[in-house]
Image: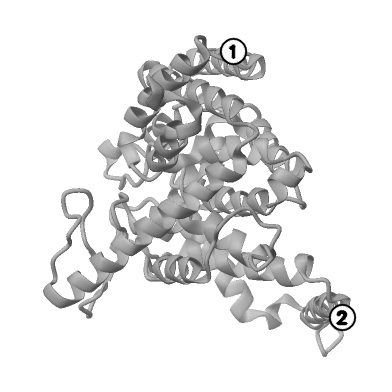
Amino acid sequence: MDLLKKKNNIDQWLVVLGIFAHRLEVIFLLITLFILINRHRTILLSRKILICFLLIFITSFISITLLNYDFSFFFKQYSVILFYCIVYSFFFQSNKYDLVNIFSKYIKICYLVSILGLVQFVVYVISQINIFSFINKASSLSGTQLSRISSFTSEPSNLAVLLVPAIAYYLFSDTKSSKTLINYKKRYFLIILVVAILTFSSIFYFSLFLMLLFKVIFLRKNKLVKKSLIVMFFFSVTLILNNPSKQIDYSDYGIFKNNIAKIDQALENVNKLDYESIDGLSISVFATLVNLSVAVKSPNRISGTGLGTHEQNYESIYPLSSGYVAKNTKDAYSLATRVFSEFGIIGLILLITFFVKYFNKHSFINMGVLFLLISLSLRGGNFVLYGVIFFFFLYYHTRLKTTNNKL
């Protein structure tokens, strides 16, 4: 039993590996739970989490009953999410003073995953063989011999999002400082960054832009840079809002009105029989708009339709039997969209409140995780896969302004 002692940190390695293991994460958590019970001889439960799940059960049960929806997916989702939260809550209570080591292990796994991703990329370029074909399909780029890197994760975009906190931490922190406890070498960062770029994930490029913008505006101590950017922003807004003719005539904004009309038409007609009927929209944009459309048109927009009901909302608004195309019907392709669909405006407000309330400008780990959560809110609606619950807990536990969290 010596191998199960805390000093070996086996539970930390298992948890961090699990977030990259897709559907195998539950197996890693089961082993972790066994280790934690053996260590503490009990299960540490959070009263707040139990109360939260009780409220979710009551509100979802009422909504699903009133809408005459099926309960099967609700019970499945509820039990799985509850198990994940119990284990992660137990894990973080057991390791609440060791967050730096947890994040350090996460960076090492990111580096390992990235190395394997580069091998995957090179082998595919040379031989057109995906060495991880038993895990995922090759996402080849049309007209080239290149393939998007996914390493041993399920999809390239999932890998890109999982690497965001590691990249953000290096960008935000002073890694050359002798005070840092995380051994994060520059070559680690460069390899992780290159792999994230080679996933060719649009959501990562957007996140990277936000991270760089955040660093320049909020983290740099150069007040001149901040003031210049603020002045440039307001100057640009002023130019847009002030027409040289000094007369606001919307007919002059033909291109603008045309684009708005196209977006409006896309939202109304995004659920046609096939993708070809939506001119100019990619599959990812289609999935985003169609699920947003479902969330907006679903009943009970105040408190939502209940956990696990987005797919039924989709079917009730755009029935597949009528020829509508199904795309990400279970997860809504976006965490924010799914929260809005299943928990309404109240759920969306609570999600935003969580981000704002537990933001810690003194913790580079906290800030890095925030950008991952923002990425998932825009692109990634699964409540349990891709380490979603792990990162929510990590964000919450790095909320305190302590030296342990800052490094």
Q: Quadrant of the N terminus?
A: top left
**What is the secondary structure assignment of the residue under circle 1?**
helix
Question: Residue 244: image x %, image y %?
Answer: 82, 90
Residue 193, image x and y in percent? Answer: 47, 68
Direction bottom: furthest residue: 244
For marks 2 and 1, give the CA distance. 51 Å
Q: Nearer the viewer, residue 8 or 333?
A: 8
- Of badges 2 and 1, nearer the viewer stands 2
Image height of 389 relative to 198, above or below: above
| Residue at 25% from the left image edge and 67% from the top image edge | 119
Seen in the picture, residue 50 relative to 191 is either above or below; the reply is above
| Tag of residue 375 | none
Q: Residue 54 bears which disc, if any?
A: 1
Q: Is residue 303 visible?
A: yes
Most foreground residue, 149 or 272: 149
Check disc 1 and give the amino acid type: Leu
**Which residue occupies 63% across, 53% down?**
181
Check disc 2 and report its element: helix, strand or loop: helix
Q: Amino acid at mark 2?
A: Leu
* Marker disc for residue 224: 2
- Tell me residue 335's x, y (percent): 52, 43
Is 273 displayed left or right of 365 in the figure? left
